[in-house]
Amino acid sequence: MKLNRAFGILTMRLILGFLFFWQGYGKVFKFGVDAVYNNFFKKTYEELLPDFIVAGTAYFTTFAELIAGFLLVIGLGRDWALYILAAVLVVVTFGHGMAEPIWDASHVLVRAIFLIPLLLLPKEWDIFSVDYLIRKDKNKNV
């Protein structure tokens, strides 16, 4: 049972981490953050919000997805990565709702379905992670 629990958590963490990582990767390395900002964020929100908020949001969400997604994949700083990605989901939900009150929330909901259980499950159960190896090593030296 403990092994099933550990693999279940690993599976959720990897799926969520890859979903965010590849989205951030595409924005940074395939399209370029400036292009994403100019072609999507700026055009969508320029009449709704000041430019510095729109630009800050574009860069924050992009790099948060890339970096926190990668951290989730390897299992390093899991809780902080989850907090950052939860903030991204809240910002994205607010932004999409502001731009278009009726929008397809399926991509946000899928991520939330994986993120919320990971926040609620004890991190000690996440044994296939760098965090677990660090904790294990610390406990060995005490």
Image (cartoon, grey):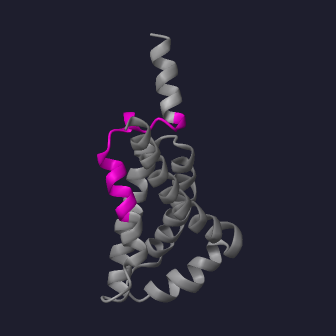
Q: Is residue 121 magenta?
A: yes
| Image coordinates for residue 50, horizontal then vertical, percent | 41, 79
Q: Residue at 57% x, 59% y: name it.
A: 66
Seen in the picture, residue 38 relative to 10 is either above or below; the reply is below
The main secondary structure of the magenta stretch is helix
Q: Residue furthest top?
A: 142
Q: Is residue 70 magenta?
A: no
Q: Nearer the viewer, residue 18 or 70?
A: 18
Q: Nearer the viewer, residue 10 or 65?
A: 10
Compared across the picture, whether 98 is left or right of 54 comes to left
Q: Residue at 47% x, 72% y: name it.
A: 52
Q: Nearer the viewer, residue 88 or 11?
A: 11
| Image coordinates for residue 24, horizontal then vertical, percent | 58, 65
Q: Residue at 33% x, 49% y: name it.
A: 119
Q: Residue furthest right?
A: 30
Compared across the picture, whether 98 is left or right of 44 comes to left
| Image coordinates for residue 86, horizontal then vertical, percent | 37, 59
| Image coordinates for residue 5, horizontal then vertical, percent | 39, 42
Seen in the picture, residue 62 relative to 128 is either above or below; the reply is below
Pick the quarter of the image with the C terminus: top left
Pick the quarter of the image with the N terminus: top left
Q: Residue at 48% x, 52% y: name it.
A: 11
Seen in the picture, residue 80 relative to 44 is either above or below; the reply is above
Q: Residue furthest front?
A: 1
Q: What range of the chain is rendered magenta?
A: 112-130
Compared across the picture, whether 5 is left or right of 66 comes to left
